[in-house]
Image (cartoon, helix red, strand yellow):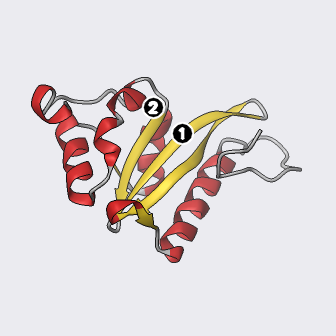
Amino acid sequence: NILLVDLARKIEVGPLFLDFACFSNYQIIKTTKRLAQEGLSMNHCVGSYLSKIENGCTGIYTLKNHTLELTSSYFKGERILFVVQLVSYGNSKADENIEKEVHDSVRKFNKSKFKNKPLDFEIPCKELDY
């Protein structure tokens, strides 16, 4: 249980997720205490994502009473971010304006990874269905 065993430890967050936090000004969760608080205050299971974060698979952010989960993958030779989920209290659907803001921010961040390459393709911001 994250609350009882691992309450105040720093989480090793992947550098791409930290870069996005600086780019977007969204607050990234970097301690087990803050991760547990987010799950409790927002009434959802994000508190159980510790191993996903430390394995470099996920970054968790908070913004405007919403929780954002991003993952990363390679696209056209560059490591970029994808929105896994953006939810409000109790896993409720996100506000449409905030959802648009997040997708725009992720898209701009991803586009910055291709700044020295010609873009003749759309860069996704949501996970691709294979």
**With 90 as the anchor, is 123 left or right in this view?**
right
**Residue 57, image x, y percentages:** 49, 30
Q: Residue at x 32, y 31 (%)?
A: 50
Q: Residue at x 65, y 52 (%)?
A: 125
73 and 105: which is toward the camera: 73
Q: Secondary structure at mark 1?
A: strand
**With 119 as the anchor, is 126 left or right in this view?**
left
* Residue at the limit of the structure toward the right, as seen here: 120
Q: Quadrant of the N terminus?
A: top left
Q: Residue type at mark 2?
A: Pro
Q: Secondary structure at mark 2?
A: helix
Residue of label 1: 71
**Residue 70, image x, y percentages:** 50, 45
Residue 55 vs 19, above or below: the answer is: above
Q: Residue at x 20, y 32 (%)?
A: 2
How many numbered badges does the structure rendering display? 2
**Residue 59, image x, y percentages:** 43, 40
Tell me the tag on residue 15.
2
**Residue 98, image x, y percentages:** 48, 70
Q: Quadrant of residue 8?
A: top left
108 and 35: which is toward the camera: 35
Q: Residue type at mark 1?
A: Thr
Which of label 1 and label 2 is nearer to you?
1
Disc 1 to disc 2, how far (Cα)? Answer: 12 Å
Residue 20 vs 93, above or below: the answer is: above
